[in-house]
Amino acid sequence: MESLELTLLGLAILLMIVWCVNWCMHLSALIYGKWRLHRQHPDVVVEELPGISILKPLVGIDPNLFENLETFFNMKYPAYELLFCIQDEFDASRMIVQSLMDKYPAVDAKMFLGGKNVGINPKINNMAIGYEAAKFDLVMISDSGIKMNEDTLIDMAVHMTSKVGLVHQMPYICTRKGFASNLEKMYFGSQHAKCYLLADLMRINCATGMSVLMRKSVLDEAGGLKAFGQYLAEDFFMAQAFLDRGWRVICCSRLALQNSGTYSISHHHRRICRWMKLRNAMVPTTVLFEPLSLCMPVGIITAWAVNYIFDISPLTFLLVHTLIWFLLDYTRMKHLEHGSIPFSKFDFVVCWFINEIGYMLLLLQSHLEPAITWRGRHFKLKWGGVVEEIYTKQTV
Ligand SMILES: CCCCCCCC/C=C\CCCCCCCC(=O)N[C@@H](CO)[C@H](O)/C=C/CCCCCCCCCCCCC
Ligand SMILES: O=c1ccn([C@@H]2O[C@H](COP(=O)(O)OP(=O)(O)O[C@H]3OC[C@@H](O)[C@H](O)[C@H]3O)[C@@H](O)[C@H]2O)c(=O)[nH]1
């Protein structure tokens, strides 16, 4: 009996430690975010910044594609080239790119059609020819849904100091109409931002491949772009290749502004679930630790612990815990927005709860359905990250 009580007390103390670690994570991410993000670079001599080759992998179109791509033709940067990689020669995005190239003849832009089969990852295959044609030593990969501010490239280049090999942007969401967009903003502004900033602070590899600037010479030393075609989480392995060679990988101070014109709650959930599956395979410790960094699971288990140790009402504890967590998320989101949050406080509360509950369900789903579907293709992820395409039989 005594040993059971001792075990329960030990467990309760352990849970309280996990709870304290979570508050430390929250506060550190808030402070680090304030220091790292939205910096200005008034003293930079822009003309001296190195040239950049920007790879834009494109598949299909969405209502914001023209607007998003146009921002790349209007960047304040001394030397850059745009390498549009279009997966299918009959893809509708070809017309959009052509019209932008006609509108901005002074911008160095080229189109590459069809890609090259160098592996399984379709994004890598799509960019393979463009990568070979890149003329600068700094290569940037920028996904189709990204919108750039005029000075983002400057910010990324400034972060590429002599010890840094890869600069990435923390994903965030542009303000668009509707609840689905607000929910996406909530996801990227709460738990995701907290962990992303912390991982960057602690130099843990967390680079997301939607917007990354890299030293091409180092990537070539690692086998070039094609070496990463066997993985679906090519972003993680690319960043790892830089870390393994002693280079620093850092997050710059501008956020990656995702502004895809096609969005819905189910699309967001499918995408996040796909990312969770990648994380589970790449960094298996996240299987245990990710649930332990979420508001509700941590609140519930700690409510039991404080009740066991201090006889505090679990419900009161849970309410106070949730309220403070919520306020910290609100503060972080305000900071990410660099101003006021673009939806009402009521919408914020609703989105926050739906995001917290949805997050837990998605984590569960990511374990129940291991296969990955990406843009209509199915993949089987093996431990360690190597991927295999699953072909389904067509019946006529
Ligand atoms: C007692 C509490 C411990 C807390 C541990 C928290 C673990 C949280 C794990 C993940 C949360 C989100 C991570 C954000 C970045 C990942 C984005 C992503 O999934 N990207 C994929 C698609 O682009 C990519 O292919 C995935 C690659 C693997 C990334 C692995 C990230 C590990 C991040 C760990 C963060 C630890 C924070 C600090 C711990 C004290
Ligand atoms: O078959 C494909 C699918 C996607 N892509 C391109 O890859 C980019 C990202 O595609 P999506 O927007 O569908 O996917 P995500 O935003 O979830 O991608 C993210 O997660 C998986 C990682 O491997 C990626 O690096 C990261 O960008 C786009 O530019 C898209 O055009 C291809 O070129 N071919």
Image (tube, helix red, strand yellow):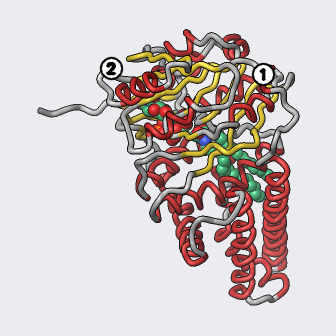
Q: Earlier in the sequence, mark 1 or mark 2?
A: 1
The C terminus sits in image quarter: top left
As rendered, which of 75 and 194 lies closer to the eye? 75
Q: Nearer the viewer, residue 369 or 247?
A: 247
CA separation in Å, label 1 and label 2:
36 Å
Residue 94 is situated, as x and y percent measured from the top left of the image, at 37, 25
Q: Residues within 10 Å of mark 2 (few under 14, many from 20)?
A: few
Numbered disc in front, either 1 or 2: 1
Q: Which residue is painted at 65% across and 53% down in the image?
A: 192
The residue under label 1 is 47
Q: Which is more toward the observer, 304 or 315?
A: 315
The reply, left or right, for residue 214 in relation to residue 183 is right
Rendered location of residue 83, percent (x, y): 52, 19
Asked whether residue 197 appears in the rendered view, the answer is yes
Where is residue 221? Give x, y as percent.
70, 11
Residue 392 falls in image quadrant: top left
Identify residue type, mark 2.
Glu
Q: Which residue is tagged 2?
A: 89
Q: Amino acid at mark 1?
A: Glu
Q: Secondary structure at mark 2?
A: loop
Q: Quadrant of residue 200?
A: top right
For this view, does 104 lie left or right of residue 234? Answer: left
Question: Is residue 32 toward the left or the right of residue 238 in the image?
Answer: right
Counting other residues with Cα less than 10 Å from the Cα at mark 1, is it few (<14), some (14-19), or many (20 or more)? Answer: few
Element type at marker 1?
helix
In the rendered image, the residue lying farthest to the left is: 396
The answer to whether one can see residue 288 in this image is no
Residue appearing at x 75%, y 83% in the figure? 317
